[in-house]
Image: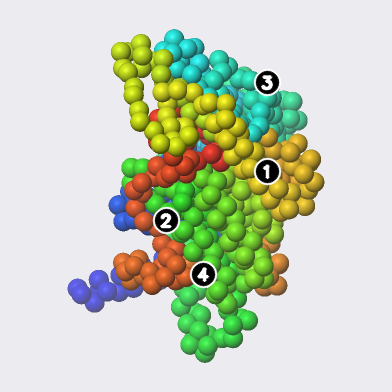
Amino acid sequence: MVESMIADQVMKLRQRRTAQLILELDLTDGLAEDRPADPVSAVLARRRPLLADVLDGLRRARGDHRVKALIAKLGGRNIGLATVQELRAAIEEFREAGKLTVAWAETFGEFSAGNVPYYLATAFDTIYLQPSGDLGLTGIAVERRFYRGTLDRLGVEFQVGKRHEYKNAADQFTERGFTGPAREATERMMASVIEQLTDAIAGRRGIDPAQARALIDRGPFLSGQALEAGLVDALGYRDEAFASVRKQAGPGAIVQYVGRYQRSHALAERARKLPERAGKLSAARQGSVALVYATGPIRRGRSGHGPLSGGAMGSDTISAALRAAITDDRARAIVLRVNSPGGSYVASDTIWREVVRARAAGKPVVVSMGDVAASGGYFISMAADAIVAQPGTITGSIGVLSGKPVLGDLLGRAGVSTDSVTEGTHSAMFSTTHPFSEDEWELVNSWLDHIYADFTGKVAAGRGMSADRVHELARGRVWTGADALANGLVDELGGLDKAAALARTKAGLPPTAPLRGYPRVRPLDRLRPPGSSEGRSAATAGLASGLLAESWGPVWRLAAQAGFSPHGPLTLPGGWTFE
């Protein structure tokens, strides 16, 4: 009896090692850029596939004869457009290797827009849609609320200085609608995104872009209408989609998540290399590319992650990671993965300096832009040897703003009186009970002029442009990655793979040189305090406490109360999420 059970288990293990594989990708919970450092956030995010794992798994599977197909569930938690484009490219390469690709969705929208998940679906051979679902192919819209009329009734005035006309984060408080420059920039961004969506539909359907655009203008679609229009290939439930894939993959095929497939192969590869490592390979053969994640709003101090408050990148943490890569002989180049709307000017400048130092030390730096790398996110990128972005990346926003609300009239109407005792001519400069005086405005504008001149000057040096050309592209204007490439603000379109390949080439490394998350901190290093700011453990993140960093100087609390980002004056205006 026992021997029979053991034999059965051995047979099953043998079958699992030799059976055909169907890789599964469930995007219900979205995708994660990197794993949170704190344990609570890590547990909450455990069901979210890691983008790097998915990309690596699909890359490995292209040459694996056992892997026959990929089936992916789309829809659910929103994924950024640039991330979708990175995943979409990997799926297209997987399909071009002769593998079957099938997407299925319960719905692309359900009474809401579903443009981005459907854009991802166009990379697959077959698209299944549940009969009760719909296709929210609606086109792209940006709607903003403006509170100037309400604030006028309340007696609240906003004093805002900005550099320059496209830097419109405060317009919701100072205007009654889009300004001319804001509307112009937004319309161009929407046109760029719709061009990318139209091209994807046209390419999949084999129709011209005008016909694809006509389909978008007809949406949204019920499932039957989507099938009739050729936007989906079949109506079916999960079991029907999986049954179809199993039939094509062959009998006995095993379904396995892409992430688990990737991890099992990565472990096996490490095991094979153990004898080589024991033989102490020369440093030249151990060369690798360090991958440093710069994710979230930028603040001074350490990076922070929290289950409720999200995360922010701290200049101390990112700078320590870059310093560690600079001093590590095995790290021959650095890929800086930037996914940030910006924040503190000072913190951005601190990180910029470490990028400059890395290049001076002979370590090529290549920036890989994620969904957003704008304002301060562009600041920390602009000194790199090369910048790689996706067509849908939100970038640019080279500008600065600051200001304060004036609440004196509102308080007076409410019967609130204010009195103060001051020492120093400008000690009450940031008080909200009165406007800036004339000489205080001069100080604010001098500060803005200094930051803008520093920002644009460093863009000119980093991108090899004239000051006039930089100013033409800057002025706070936001660009898509596609338009940023056309204007010289980025160097190539692509994802993390493209950035890693560029870094290897610039460092003279072979194409097989590994891309390693950096710094590689041991568990014990996370528990004990670092010995100095030079140590690897100095690059570990803390909890997301104090996310309202004083990145605006003394006015940071007022900025937060006023609706500005609390992280600082180099922040992308508004929220930029495409659905």
**Sequence-wise first label, 1 or 4:** 4
Q: Which residue is mark 2?
A: 302
Q: Quadrant of the N terminus?
A: bottom left
Compare marks 3 and 2 and give the one earlier in the sequence. 3
- Answer with mark 1 or mark 2, whichever residue precedes in sequence: 2
Q: What is the C-alpha distance between the residues marked 1 and 2?
A: 27 Å
Residue type, mark 4 in image:
Ala
Residue 478 position, x and y percent, is: 64, 35
Bin the neighbour count of mark 3 within 10 Å (Cα to Cα): few under 14, some 14-19, many 20 and up. Answer: few
Query: Regarding mark 2 in the picture, which secondary structure is present there?
Result: loop
C-alpha span from label 4 to label 2:
15 Å
Estimate the x, y position of residue 251 in percent, counting from the top left: 47, 56
Q: CA distance from mark 3 to mark 4?
A: 46 Å
Query: Which residue is denoted by mark 3 in the rendering?
Result: 180
360 or 208: nearer the viewer: 360
Q: Which mark is residue 324?
A: 4
Instruction: Sort mark 4 into few (<14), some (14-19) or many (20+) by Cα contacts within 10 Å.
Output: many
Q: In terms of sequence position, does the residue under pointer 3 or pointer 4 come before the other?
A: 3
Mark pair 3, 1: CA separation: 24 Å
Rounded to the nearest angstrom, the CA distance separating label 1 from label 4 is 31 Å
Query: Does the CB distance between marks 4 and 2 fall below 8 Å?
Result: no
Q: Is residue 261 left or right of residue 374?
A: left
Pick whichever of labels 3 and 1 is earlier in the sequence. 3
> Along the line of sight, which residue is nearer the eye, 115 or 510?
510
Q: Quadrant of residue 195?
A: top right
Q: Please tell me whether mark 1 or mark 4 is closer to you in this view.
A: 1
Instruction: Report which residue position mark 1 lands on.
Output: 453
Q: Secondary structure at mark 4?
A: helix
Q: Which residue type carries mark 1?
A: Ala
